[in-house]
Image (cartoon, grey):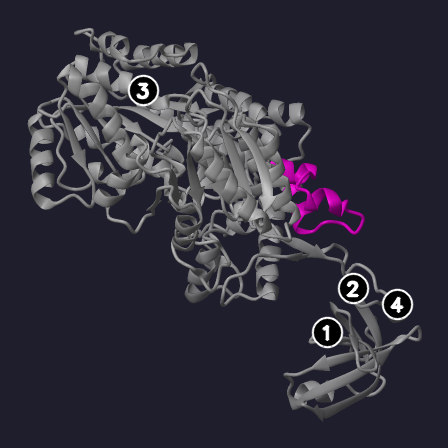
Amino acid sequence: MTKSKPGLSSALTVLRGVGPALARTLERLGLYRVEDLLFLLPLRYEDRTSFVPIGAARPGMRCLVSGTVLLAETVYRGRRSLLVRISDGSGQITLRFFHFSRQQQAQFQNGATVTCFGDVRPGPVGIEMVHPEYRVLRGEQEPEVDDALTPIYPLTEGVQQGRLRNLVAQALEMMRREAPEELLPAQVLQELELPSLEAALHYLHKPPPDVDLASIENGKHPCQLRLSFEELLAHYMSLRNLRDLASREPATPLVDRKGLRGLFVSSLPFKLTGAQERVVAEIAADLALAHPMMRLIQGDVGSGKTVVAAAACMQAVSAGSQAAIMAPTELLAEQHWASFSAWFDALGIELAWLSGSQKQAARRASLEAIQAGRASVIVGTHALFQEGVEFANLALVVIDEQHRFGVHQRVALRNKGLANRHSDARKHPHQLVMTATPIPRTLAMAAYADLDTSIIDELPPGRQPVTTIALPDTRRAEVVERVRSACASGQQAYWVCPLIDESELLDYQAAEASFAMLTDALDPLRVGLVHGRIKNARREEIMRAFKAGDIDVLVATTVIEVGVDVPNAGLMIIENSERMGLSQLHQLRGRVGRGAQQSHCVMLYKQPLGQLARNRLAVLRETNDGFLVAQRDLELRGPGELLGTKQTGLPEYRIANLVRDAELMPVVQKSAEIIQRQFKPAAQQIVRRWLGDAHQYGKV
């Protein structure tokens, strides 16, 4: 039986110079097969396609030069170094080496021709290059230039640039014999006017000298768009696969048999907005189906997402099932516990509380009530889904501040409902996820393709936009007087600081220091302090006092970004605002403006103010629209911060960039529908190519 020739799908060990140890090292770069090398694109390029006359070389340039050795000497000025002076007739340059051997020094004979590439910098006697890449020519050899730009690849410890270039070159040579399979249908390529996969890969690894480098640096070259498009397509189709899987799984239809949802809405001390009523209806229709709802509620701070979620929970209870509400922090979970208790106790609905810091006796009581089915609504942190928590008949999971959990955690939650104690059938719970971080449409299409989306785009009546100003912290005394004046008129104020204690590393105004300063400066006003290190019971007591009006000014860290709702708080002061992201600042600002009175936000900043921070603060001065703020945050900081990917492990894109390539998403969505309907095998292969065999979002 003849052995098949190595191909692009072969392990890296088929390449020259790759043994088991190097193969394991290359795995750190996500390289497992030969084809993976083709998709490891250069970070940047160096131009070695022409020589720069030495006389034209200037400090700051990185270039290729060639010349004849005039002298080579070892000097001892502070430290031992080898100096090699070369000339090409137009000028001279010194090559400086701090680490060298006798053999290296012997290469640089007078009259030898040397080509070298490196950074030009000023030296003691003219220009020089320190440790350039060099080649000493032998005999009749002529200086040569490359026929393409030189790629600079991302590296990992144990792999040098030259070795990686060699491996990619081997992979490109193999690609000439066996082109990677073109998985995009011809009609898609033609419509988008994109090159073939093989042409795109070859071009990006070996760009010709006349390449438009600006378009490559901006990620807008057609060859990059070809790869970005396919990668976005892979992620999108993977999430759609997850959605399709969910649509085929069984779930308990939740019908409002007892009319509890309507009873709950009519018992509220306020009327729902039109947007809230619309979203409640969308959720109600989903919950009544026999497959799991997977819906995202987007709404700006103060738009009333929690009451909409409560209506959904009441529908589950009315259908005889349990609902669980999970928040990322104890503070936010406690806020939900307070709201749900106030709403549901009056209707005779039993609730249970679960958190990591709960005392054992209280935890046991909660677990027993949950397991027995007495507790219809369960509120807590991620402790809700840890080992040992058994639900009687969990049918609805509500996840708040979804972006802090991440895709794979969202997927894992679906399985918790399968362990219902009182049910023989393996049914999945319905999922409702909420975020107060508005997400631009194109980003939502990419990150939440497995979810239906509802938007609460209307604030409760009587709310006025918060007026926002930015001031240097040198005017802190004026701001303190403004706080005194606001409190004298009957309002309350927040004073937010990034840190709890003074830090030698970060020159932030710390909460403890601000508390001491304001207590003294605002006497006899009542000043409170709350932060993450204060015990839960004490923190809750302080926030309850603030809500009741027993505290005039609440000094806090960003723990109040989500949480306490105080309609009488009309002034927000934010220290070191230049250090915070747009979405976080917008969330903090959303703590005020919840009453009928005009509210204000003052962002204090430390000078000098950088351009990015200046742009960020300008956005907040100009608009209160959370979706516009989110779009600008996306442009300024990228999707990782907005979606919380650093915390959640949401997979990073290898080539695509959600901000840069956002305009591709509508076409990605349209193409995915065509491919999944007409080219099913290609859809599976695209996902596998970009996300691997064990991709994160569910099997194809």
Question: Disc 3 or disc 1, which is closer to the eye?
Answer: 3
Q: Residue at x 73, y 55 (%)?
A: 149
Q: Amino acid at mark 2?
A: Met
Please give the label number shown on residue 53. 4
- In front of the other: 503 or 397: 503
Q: Secondary structure at mark 1?
A: strand
Question: Disc 4 or disc 3, which is closer to the eye?
Answer: 3
Using the numbered discs, state the Cα–Cα distance from disc 3 to disc 1 in whole angstroms. 69 Å
Question: Disc 4 or disc 1, which is closer to the eye?
Answer: 4
* First in residue order: circle 3 vs circle 2: 2
Q: Which residue is mark 2?
A: 61
Q: Which residues are magenta?
A: 200-226
Q: Secondary structure at mark 3?
A: helix
Position of 428 compared to 198: left or right?
Answer: left
**On the image, which quarter does residue 87 sit in?**
bottom right
Position of 141 compared to 431: left or right?
Answer: right
Q: Secondary structure at mark 4?
A: loop
Please give the label number shown on residue 134. 1
* First in residue order: circle 4 vs circle 3: 4
**On the image, which quarter does residue 298 sit in?**
top left
Q: Amino acid at mark 1?
A: Tyr
Q: Which residue is mark 3?
A: 307
Using the numbered discs, state the Cα–Cα distance from disc 3 to disc 2 in whole angstroms. 61 Å
- In front of the other: 399 or 126: 399
* Whether residue 422 can be seen here: yes
Using the numbered discs, state the Cα–Cα distance from disc 2 to disc 4 in whole angstroms. 12 Å
